Image (cartoon, rainbow, N blue to C red):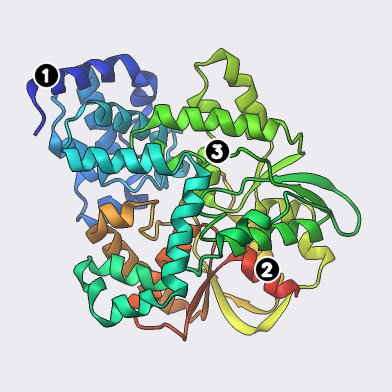
């Protein structure tokens, strides 16, 4: 429960820090409603829609309503998929309003000691330190390779966890040994005619748990004519922090990443994770009030591209033969890649260029799968409700391969395959891995 003093602090900071002009931009037209998963899944409850949440934010800012736990829950239940933004006739930057509001509430609300320790461990001690991420995921790798995972399932240990978490443990990718990660070079030369120098944003989980996908991305860039460099001293993008009310920590991480990539002097900065890309591309926004960093952030953002976008720009699909055994393929958009980075045609162009592939568009591919970072853990019931409806649409395509462009989406679709008992019959794969298979 929020105390009176906490409510007053939150109201004061809303008035000082929320972008009031952006709040006023919402015309309450309702165009956002059909695109909002939580509005639909809760039976059209207004407080779980973008329009309703903006009204709540404005009410707190105007002082006509008090912040409370119910309002905080309304904001927390938002996936942050930002599907409302492309359909908004006023161009309201809802995602930015949401992150600012969450940051203010998080900073002021009282939490239990266990929650404080957990947040400190995740946001301060783990994700901002890539060497610690490597150590943590190497423990997961040992758990997988040693056979402990099979024992844990056999004795029913995983039954102690929520069903979604227990199932997720089954679909985690095989983690490489830490030595393998550490020994990978940081520079790779182009093949054929040189077209550009690309700096890879390796990511925290992408460069540990999804190490093979990063390697596939590097090989595709080489084949496309790019020298590839992996800048040292880069960190997690900060998306987890930004979406969880830890904006100041996210700003610090953004600054270190900008410095790391400035040193590479690359033509492009490439990401293969839609969630990371969407936060990276807003570095100029979160640093706009810091004169020393604002222009540097803009230069960083101007070079940023998703792997699918750079491949299409460089005519990769026209200069290389891509072929796979005959199969039906569908594509689930990464919400952030589509709605924030505006990249949605390029993955489809690449998939349709593969010989042997019958491409079937997924109805509702532009709506969230329920992953949304750690949403499927902290809001498991809503996430599974969304995922189950998504899998119904997948079934209609009769696809045997579901392609995604974000690690969270990939794990969520694998989880969905497990839930509908199609393991071994249907697979989920990152687009970079599929393209490399098609090239080989």
Q: Is residue 9 visible?
A: yes
**Residue 280 badge:** 3
- Residue with the most extreme right position: 193
Residue 78 at x, y percent in the picture: 30, 45
| Label 1 secondary element | helix
Q: Residues within 10 Å of mark 3 (few under 14, many from 20)?
A: many
| Label 2 secondary element | helix
Residue 194 at x, y percent in the picture: 88, 50
Foreground mark, 1 or 2?
1
Q: Residues within 10 Å of mark 1 (few under 14, many from 20)?
A: few
Q: Is residue 172 visible?
A: no
Q: Is residue 36 left or right of residue 140?
A: left
Q: Is residue 411 left or right of residue 261?
A: left
Mark-to-mark CA distance, 1 and 3 = 35 Å
Mark-to-mark CA distance, 2 and 3 = 24 Å
Q: Quadrant of the C terminus?
A: bottom right
Pointer 2 residue = 435
Residue 342 at x, y percent in the picture: 57, 46
Q: Residues within 10 Å of mark 2 (few under 14, many from 20)?
A: many
Q: Nearer the viewer, residue 37 or 378?
A: 378
- The numbered mark, 2 or 3, whose residue comes first in the sequence reads 3
Q: Quadrant of the N terminus?
A: top left
Pointer 1 residue = 5
Residue pictured at 54% horizontal, 57% vertical: 208
Is mark 2 in CB contact (under 8 Å) with mark 3?
Answer: no
On screen, 28 above or below 155? above
Q: Quadrant of residue 269?
A: top right
């Amino acid at each position: 429960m929020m105390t009176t003093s906490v409510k007053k602090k939150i109201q004061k900071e809303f008035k000082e820090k929320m972008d009031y002009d952006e709040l006023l931009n919402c015309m309450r037209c309702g165009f956002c409603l059909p695109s909002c998963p939580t509005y639909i899944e809760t039976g059209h409850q207004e407080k779980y829609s973008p329009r309703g949440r903006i009204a709540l934010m404005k009410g707190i800012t105007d002082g006509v309503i008090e912040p409370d736990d119910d309002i905080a829950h309304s904001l927390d239940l938002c996936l942050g998929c930002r599907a409302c933004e492309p359909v908004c006739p006023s161009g309201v930057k809802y995602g930015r309003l949401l992150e600012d509001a969450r940051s203010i509430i998080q900073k002021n609300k009282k939490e239990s000691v266990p929650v404080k320790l957990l947040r400190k461990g995740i946001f301060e001690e783990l994700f901002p330190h890539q060497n610690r991420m490597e150590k943590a995921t190497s423990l997961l790798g040992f758990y997988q390779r040693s056979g402990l995972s099979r024992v844990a399932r056999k004795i029913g240990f995983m039954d102690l966890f929520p069903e979604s978490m227990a199932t997720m443990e089954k679909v985690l990718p095989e983690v490489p040994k830490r030595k393998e990660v550490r020994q990978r070079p940081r520079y790779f030369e182009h093949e054929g005619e040189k077209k550009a120098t690309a700096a890879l944003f390796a990511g925290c989980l992408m460069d540990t748990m999804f190490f093979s996908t990063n390697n596939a991305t590097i090989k595709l860039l080489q084949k496309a004519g790019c020298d590839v460099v992996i800048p040292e001293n880069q960190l997690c993008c900060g998306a987890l922090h930004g979406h969880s009310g830890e904006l100041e920590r996210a700003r610090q991480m953004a600054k270190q990443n900008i410095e790391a990539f400035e040193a590479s002097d690359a033509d492009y900065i490439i990401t293969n994770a839609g969630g990371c890309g969407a936060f990276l591309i807003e570095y100029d926004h979160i640093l706009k009030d810091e004169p020393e960093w604002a222009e540097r952030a803009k230069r960083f953002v101007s070079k940023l591209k998703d792997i699918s976008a750079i491949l299409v720009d460089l005519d990769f699909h026209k200069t290389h033969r891509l072929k796979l055994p005959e199969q039906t393929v569908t594509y689930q958009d990464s919400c952030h890649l589509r709605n924030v980075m505006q990249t949605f045609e390029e993955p489809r162009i690449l998939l349709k260029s593969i010989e042997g592939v019958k491409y079937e568009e997924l109805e509702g591919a532009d709506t969230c799968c329920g992953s949304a970072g750690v949403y499927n853990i902290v809001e498991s019931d809503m996430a599974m409700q969304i995922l189950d409806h998504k899998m119904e649409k997948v079934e209609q395509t009769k696809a045997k391969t579901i392609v995604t462009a974000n690690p969270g989406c990939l794990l969520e679709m694998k989880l969905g395959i497990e839930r509908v008992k199609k393991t071994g019959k249907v697979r989920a794969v990152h687009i970079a891995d599929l393209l490399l298979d098609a090239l080989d």
